[in-house]
Every structure is written in structure tokens, then in C-alpha cells.
Image (spheres, rainbow, N blue to C red):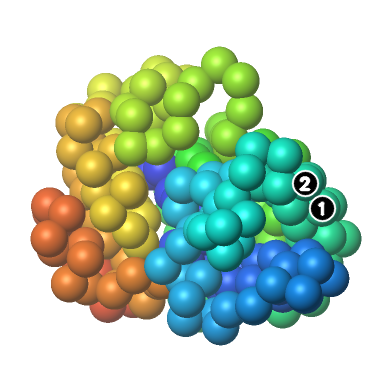
Amino acid sequence: MKAAIFDLDGTLADTIGDISAAVNRSLARRGFPVHGAGDYKLMVGNGFRNLVTKALPPSERSEARIEELRAESAADYEAHCFDLTRPYPGVRELLAALAGEGLPMAVLSNKIQALTAKVVAGLFPEIPFVLVRGEGPGFPRKPDPAAALDAARLLGVPPAEVAYLGDSDVDMRTAAAAGMLALGAAWGFRGEAELRAAGADAVLAEPGEMLRYF
């Protein structure tokens, strides 16, 4: 492999504590039931709007309520996105090793663009990512492969020579649709069984195992 694309939440960083706290605060203000971190690990991965839709009681999922909760939760999360969030053990070392070899790297997330950029810049300021892309206009969310294919173009590497590391079925489907090597992060939010069922080419037990592919 000659380049790498990384998912963010559940792959590079454990963000679930701050995400769940932000959404729960918005739910609690309205008297709605809140959820545990384990529940949120199953809800995330398809953008903030889908997350709050799942978090709301079914009877409250009107367009107006969803947008209200999305906007409030996103603003709350932006203000608290480093309270609990940390890189997973071994991630900094992996990124530093790849950067040291001059390998081009990108981050591709379904998190809102501004939040994706803020979290990556805050956690990994020393890593020279070619691209940090979150949800925004121009490209559909993963698992549509368009954003991943455009990332490969910007990295200057054919898709077949790109290793894509993610922690969910969405990531594995994205990598497969883009013709990339689909590597599953077993330490993430979803676990090995989901990754293998989604067609992972390999499932890694810890970040350093990715180096063998370069």
C-alpha cells in the first residue's frame, strides 16, 4: 500500500464519551430518556442528524424536532469535544511512523466537517494529513465511495494502493466500493464480528498492525 485513509470516531480516537454527553444533555433538557455509551456506539457512523434521530423517542422524530436537537447537540459537542476524547493507544505511533515514511494520509468521516477538522487538529497537530474531510456539501456520506475516491485522487495514489482503516460496516463497505484495502479496527465502536460480516480484508487487533501493509 502507498497511502492511507482513516475513519475518525472509533478508529483514530475514542470520541463516544463526548458525543453521548452532548446528545444526552439535549435530550435531558426536554425530559426525554437518555442513553448509555454502549447504545451510542451503535448509533454513530452515519452523521449527526441520523444520530439524534435514533436517540429521540420515535414519537418525537418530526423534522423540526430532529433539526432542533441536531443543531443544539452539535453546538454542545463542539464546546466539549475534548473533555473525554483521546486517541486510542498506539494511534499516535502509527501515524508518526507513516508520516516518517512520507506516506500520504487522509481522514474521512461522516462527522460534520467543522467538527472533524477541529478534532483532528486538536488531537494530531503534528500529522501532515493531505486531507481531512467530514460531512458537507459536495460529496455524499459514506458508504458512498465518492469521497474516498476523491481522497485517493488528492493523495495521488490509485485506489487499489490505498489502505482504508475504519471500525464499522459503513467503513468496510466504503473501502470495498472504492476498491481499497478494507482494514477493520477491532478496538473501535463496533467490534470484529461486524467488521468481518461487512467484508473486511483483515481485522487488526491494534493500530501498529497496519504497518505491515506498507
The Cα–Cα distance between marks 2 and 1, rounded to whole angstroms, is: 6 Å
Q: Which three-letter amino acid code belongs to the residue tagged 1?
A: Glu
Which image quadrant is residue 200 in? Answer: bottom left
Which image quadrant is residue 52 in? Answer: bottom right
**The disc label shown at residue 72, or none:** 1
Q: In the image, is residue 151 above or below residue 193?
A: above
Along the viewing direction, whichever of 154 and 143 lies nearer the viewer: 143
- Horizontal and vertical percent position of residue 173: 24, 43
Along the viewing direction, whichever of 154 and 176 lies nearer the viewer: 176
Farthest residue in the front direction? 59
Residue appearing at x 71%, y 47% in the figure? 65
Q: Which three-letter amino acid code belongs to the residue tagged 2?
A: Glu
Along the viewing direction, whichever of 159 and 192 lies nearer the viewer: 192
Residue appearing at x 60%, y 61% in the figure? 56
Do we see residue 33 in this rendering? yes
Q: What secondary structure is marked by label 1?
A: helix
Do we see residue 100 in this rendering? no
Mark 2 or mark 1: which is in front? 2
- Horizontal and vertical percent position of residue 45: 46, 53
Residue appearing at x 35%, y 62% in the figure? 167
**The disc label shown at residue 8, or none:** none
- Horizontal and vertical percent position of residue 177: 21, 31
- Horizontal and vertical percent position of residue 99: 51, 49
**The disc label shown at residue 68, or none:** 2
Relative to 204, 35 lies left or right: right
Q: In the image, is residue 114 above or below residue 187?
A: above
The answer to whether mark 2 and mark 1 are in CB contact below 8 A is: yes
Q: What secondary structure is marked by label 2?
A: helix
Along the viewing direction, whichever of 199 and 55 lies nearer the viewer: 55
